Structures are given as C-alpha cells and as structure tokens.
C-alpha cells in the first residue's frame, strides 16, 4: 500500500469520527437519544412514541415505574398502595438515609417499587413495578414489605398478581434484613398459589441477585423482555468459580428461554395484549385459577 493511500484511509476515518460527534452534539441535550446497542440516533419524542424501543435494532431502553404503568394498565385505573412506608437505617450505614432522600426527590417514589390495584383490559389485578432508577431497584426491607402487602392484597381480592422486576439484588446497606425479604415475599406468593390464584412474573433488564433467586423466578408464568440480563451472580464470579468460559449470551433472556427457565419472551409492544390474554384465560367469574 502506498503512503498516499494510508493517509487517505486515516483522513476518511477521521472524517467519519467527526461526523458521529457532530450528529450527537448538534442538538440540545434531550432532543435526541443514541441507542447503546446499535448506536443509531433517534429523536427522543419518536423513541418515546415507540415505547422506548429502538426502531433499528429493537433494543429495549429502561422504563421507570410510572412509564411502565402508563403503557401496561388501563388508563386512570391505578390506585397506589403503601406509599407511607419509609426506609430507615437499621445498621447505621453511613449516608444511607441521605442517599434514599436523593432518590425520593429524583423519582417521586418512597422506595424502589410501585405497587397498587388496577385493571388490565377491564380485569382487576394487583400490579408491582420495580424501578431501577431508585437505588438500582435494590431490595431492602420496604421493597420486600410493599411487594408482600401487594401479594396479600391480590389474595384478599382474589385477583391475579403481576410484577415487573428490575433489580441489582438485595440491598447491602440493610444486610441480612434485605435477604429476609426473599423468604417473606416467597411465602406470601405460596399462600397466593394455594388459593388457586394467578401470579405472573415479568423480568426486565436487569433482574439479578436475591430478586432473581426469589419472587422473580417463581411465577406461574415467567416472562421476559428481549435481551434482558437475568441471573444471580455476575459472569466473572461464575467463570472464576467453575473455571470455564461462559457462552456470550449467558444470562440473557434468550439463553434462559432456550434452557427452560422462562416461558416466553414478549416485545414491549405486545406485552400488554399477551399478558391480558393470559389473565383472561385464567379468570372465571372474577376469580383467577391456575
């Protein structure tokens, strides 16, 4: 290759890099959004109209709990529960309460899960949505308590319980108290099941740690969004433990579906319709049956 050709290639690469930078910086912040997977740049409003799913590669962006509720349940039907519950600092972990207060102001939530009674295409349900924008959706005592009370409300009303999970796992600032929520929520779901009532678990990106090892994985139906990260321990920890290289798609929703740990993967655009169909199949005379 001639030296002249080499300079030509470098000049072309530099021009491409400058073009990419210009595309990102030529708009005010928030007007456009870049897809982290395919790098396509979308007008933010158009992306929101598409339920925050990339129009090019179908990457599912993160939704907060209010956004999720808005696209899933019937408009105007949601009645929030247990917003009075407050997180304390049982282990006196430094600056823990201050961080909780910051997330409260940022999200408008009292903790990392939003729970309440609603209708789904006219059918009564109890819904919980974990919010990864609040302490990465980590599971502390209040999160576990709110989910448990929501399950108990569904059992009392004899209606299906539906949860969208998104979590980094148990919250280390509350130590063993956060781990206790795994058992507490699972026991409530066991009682719900013994009453012949439906439980649908919908796993979103990411669902990890103690959440994935407890209530997220014991639904009558375990459903996920495409390419969601789902697992207990991290890839590196597992590889060091088993001393083997793991598959590239390990701990993705697609990998779990292939190996029998999920029942289905639904795109966001079809989630409401398909979950409503499942609920309708199980509900007879206002009572869900499994």
Image: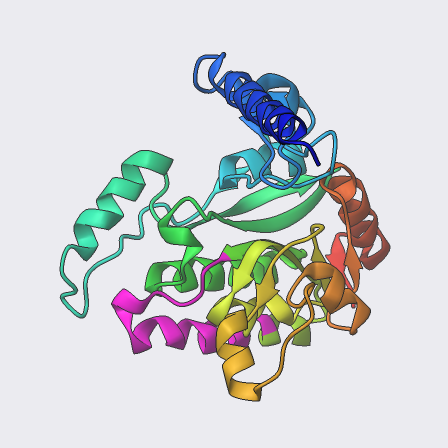
Residue 93 x/y as whole percent: 16, 64
**Going by the picture, which residue comes out furthest to the right?**
281
Q: Is residue 109 above or below residue 89?
A: above
Look at the picture and state if 157 lies above or below 104.
Answer: below
Foreground: 61 or 137?
A: 61
230, 70: nearer the viewer:
230
Q: Quadrant of the N terminus?
A: top right
Which quarter shows the C terminus? bottom right
Residue 168 rendering spot, x and y as whole percentages: 45, 60
Q: Position of residue 152 (x, y in %)?
A: 52, 63
Q: Give me the residue at 65% from left, 74% from top.
A: 246
What residue is at 62 percent from the left and 31 percent from the top?
Answer: 3
Q: Is residue 217 visible?
A: yes
Q: Total label count?
A: 0
- Point out the stretch of residues depicted in magenta: 167-189
Q: Is residue 198 left or right of residue 236?
A: right
208, 3: nearer the viewer: 3
| Residue at the spot 70% in from the left edge and 65% down from the top edge | 197
Give the residue drawn at x 41%, y 52%. Answer: 136
- The chief SS type of the magenta part is helix
Query: On screen, 163 above or below 74?
Result: below
Q: Is residue 52 magenta?
A: no
Q: Work out whether 50 lies above or below 102.
A: above
Q: Is residue 185 visible?
A: no
Residue extending furthest toward the front: 2
Q: Is residue 285 left or right of residue 252?
A: right
Query: Which of 77 and 186 lies nearest the eye of the viewer?
Result: 186
Q: Position of residue 209 (x, y in %)?
A: 48, 70
């Amino acid at each position: 290759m001639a030296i002249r050709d080499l300079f030509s290639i470098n000049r072309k690469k530099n021009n491409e890099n400058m073009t990419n930078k210009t595309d990102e910086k030529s708009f005010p912040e928030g007007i456009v959004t870049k897809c982290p997977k395919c790098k396509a740049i979308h007008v933010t409003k158009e992306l929101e109209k598409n339920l925050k799913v990339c129009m090019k590669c179908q990457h599912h962006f993160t939704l907060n709990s209010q956004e999720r509720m808005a696209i899933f349940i019937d408009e105007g039907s949601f009645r929030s529960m247990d917003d009075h519950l407050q997180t304390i600092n049982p282990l006196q972990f430094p600056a823990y309460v201050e961080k909780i207060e910051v997330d409260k102001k940022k999200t408008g939530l009292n903790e990392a899960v939003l729970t309440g009674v609603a209708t789904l295409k006219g059918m009564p349900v109890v819904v919980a949505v974990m919010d990864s924008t609040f302490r990465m959706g980590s599971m502390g005592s209040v999160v576990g308590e709110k989910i448990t009370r929501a399950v108990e409300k569904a059992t009392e009303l004899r209606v299906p319980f539906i949860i969208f999970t998104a979590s980094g796992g148990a919250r280390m600032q509350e130590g063993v108290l956060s781990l206790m929520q795994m058992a507490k929520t699972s026991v409530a779901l066991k009682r719900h099941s013994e009453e012949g009532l439906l439980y649908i678990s919908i796993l979103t990106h990411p669902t990890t740690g103690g959440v994935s090892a407890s209530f997220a994985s014991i639904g009558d139906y375990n459903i996920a969004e495409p390419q969601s990260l789902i697992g207990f321990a991290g890839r590196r920890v597992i590889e060091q433990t088993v001393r083997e290289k793991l598959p590239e798609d390990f701990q993705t929703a697609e990998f779990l579906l292939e190996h029998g740990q999920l029942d289905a993967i639904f795109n966001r655009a079809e989630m409401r319709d398909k979950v409503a169909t499942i609920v309708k199949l199980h509900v007879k005379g206002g009572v869900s049956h499994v």
